[in-house]
Amino acid sequence: MAQQRPIRVLLAKSGLDGHDRGIKVISQGLREEGMEVIYIGLRQSPEKIVNAALQEGVDVIGLSSLSGGYRNFFPEVVKLTREKGMDDVLIIGGGIIPEKDMQFLIIGGDAAGMSAASRAKRKKPETDVTVLEQTGDVSYSA
């Protein structure tokens, strides 16, 4: 049986957002779950994020915004990934995002937008599979 490679995740902070504690915690948690994480740091442009994702051959791009820049940066990252043919790359985002902006950020396909008050917890720790149960506010689009 062929061994599967770990899921590759690129994490980035966009714009002038200088708060990185949360994304570093997420990074560590993903690593503990066996994912390969590439954190490219603070103050990245959408172009740099997408180019790094393309170069690294990632499966997931994770964006974080605590400064309100998500309305500009998150959609631009989505647009650039699609322009570069990266349709199979999952794009996720989080941060301090008011409920009124959740719908704005849910762009096509199945998506969930979670506020900072949301929590995910391990539901079945006795298995090798991590099942997340969403608690708190969440908006879904189908």
Image (tube, rainbow, N blue to C red):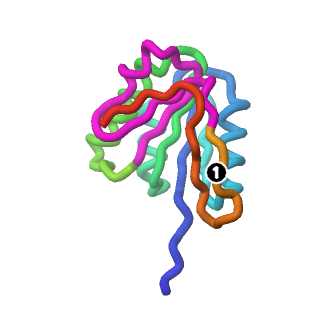
Q: Position of 95 compared to 73: left or right?
A: right
In depth, the one of 120 and 84 nearer the eye is 120
Q: Position of residue 37 (x, y in %)?
A: 61, 52
Q: Residue at x 51, y 14 (%)?
A: 98
Query: Is 102 covered by the magenta stretch?
Result: yes
Q: Residue furthest bottom?
A: 1
Of residues 15 and 119, which is closer to you in this image?
Answer: 119
Q: Quadrant of residue 31?
A: bottom right
- Secondary element at tag 1: loop
Q: Residues within 10 Å of mark 1 (few under 14, many from 20)?
A: few
Counting labels gives 1
Is residue 86 covered in magenta? no
Classify 127 as above or below 137.
below
On the image, the x and y values in percent for residue 23 come to 65, 35
- Amino acid beneath label 1: Lys
Q: Is residue 78 above or below residue 103?
A: below
11 to the left or right of 82: right
Work out whether 94 lies above or below 10: above
9 relative to 51 in the view: left or right: right
Give how far across and how far down residue 127 sits, in percent: 65, 65
Pointer 1 residue: 123
Residue pictured at 68% horizontal, 23% vertical: 19
Q: Which residues are magenta?
A: 90-119
Residue at (30% x, 49% y) in the render: 87
Quadrant in which residue 141 is drawn: top left
- Quadrant showing the C terminus: top left
* Front residue of this view, candidates 40 and 100: 100
Q: Give residue 25's position: percent from left, percent from top.
A: 72, 39
